[in-house]
C-alpha cells in the first residue's frame, strides 16, 4: 500500500481519495475506519447529553430495559435499543457478544475460554465482558481459531 499526503494551504476540509485496482476486504476495512472518524453517538449522564466518538465506545449492554454505552471515561445511557446500535455500528467493527451486549472488536485486549463454551474478553480498560456460547463460534471463526 502506498500512502501519499498532500498539504494544500487554505483547504478547509480533509479529502481522502483511495485509488485501487479492486475494492477488496482491506480497502473496505480502511473505508470503515475512516468513517468512524466522522461518526459520533450520543449518550446521557447526569442530565447532560455527550457526543461520543464511536471508537471510544468499548461495549454496550442492556440492563432492566435500559441501554448503556461504556467508555474509558464512564458509563452513558442511550435511548437507542441494542439492536439499533448493532445495526448502526456493525460496519464499524462492533459485534454481538450476547443477547444483551455488543462489543467493539478493536477494544479487545485478550480473550480466553470460559465455562460452558463461553469466551471471556478483556478489554483495553481491563474490564471483562463475556461472549455467550451462541456467539462465541462466530468470534472464533473471525479470529481464525
Image (cartoon, rainbow, N blue to C red):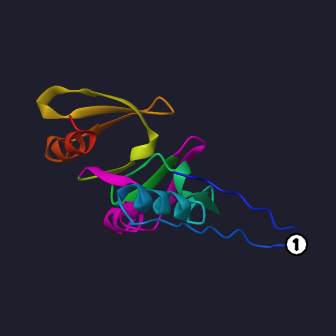
Q: Is residue 80 left or right of residue 34?
A: left
Q: How many marks?
A: 1
Q: Is residue 137 above or below residue 25?
A: above
Instruction: Give me the residue at 21% from left, 27% from top.
Output: 113
Give x and y (percent) for residue 25.
35, 58
Span of residues in magenta? 71-98
Q: Is residue 135 left or right of residue 66?
A: left
Q: Is residue 63 visible?
A: no
Closest to the observer: 90 or 134?
90
Instruction: Give me the residue at 46% from left, 61% from top.
Output: 32
Is 82 one of the magenta-colored residues? yes
- Kindly identify which residue carries mark 1: 10
Is 73 one of the magenta-colored residues? yes
Closest to the observer: 118 or 76?
118
Q: Determine which quarter of the picture holds residue 72.
A: top right
Give x and y (percent) for residue 124.
49, 33
Q: Is residue 121 above or below residue 99?
A: above
Mark 1 crowdedness (10 Å alpha carbons): few <14, some 14-19, many ≥20: few
Closest to the observer: 109 or 11?
11
Question: Which residue is outermost to the right?
Answer: 10
Amino acid at each position: 500500500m502506498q500512502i501519499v499526503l498532500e498539504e494544500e494551504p487554505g483547504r478547509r476540509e480533509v479529502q481522502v481519495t483511495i485509488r485501487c485496482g479492486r475494492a477488496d476486504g482491506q480497502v473496505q476495512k480502511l473505508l470503515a475506519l475512516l468513517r468512524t472518524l466522522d461518526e459520533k453517538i450520543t449518550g446521557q449522564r447526569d442530565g447532560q447529553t455527550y457526543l461520543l466518538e464511536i471508537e471510544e465506545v468499548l461495549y454496550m449492554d442492556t440492563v432492566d430495559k435500559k441501554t448503556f454505552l461504556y467508555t474509558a471515561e464512564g458509563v452513558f445511557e442511550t435511548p437507542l435499543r441494542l439492536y439499533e446500535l448493532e445495526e448502526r455500528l456493525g460496519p464499524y467493527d462492533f459485534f454481538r457478544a450476547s443477547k444483551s451486549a455488543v462489543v467493539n472488536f478493536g477494544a479487545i485486549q485478550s480473550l480466553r475460554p470460559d465455562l460452558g463454551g463461553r469466551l471471556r474478553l478483556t478489554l483495553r480498560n481491563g474490564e471483562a465482558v463475556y461472549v455467550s456460547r451462541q456467539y462465541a463460534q462466530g468470534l472464533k471463526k473471525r479470529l481464525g481459531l
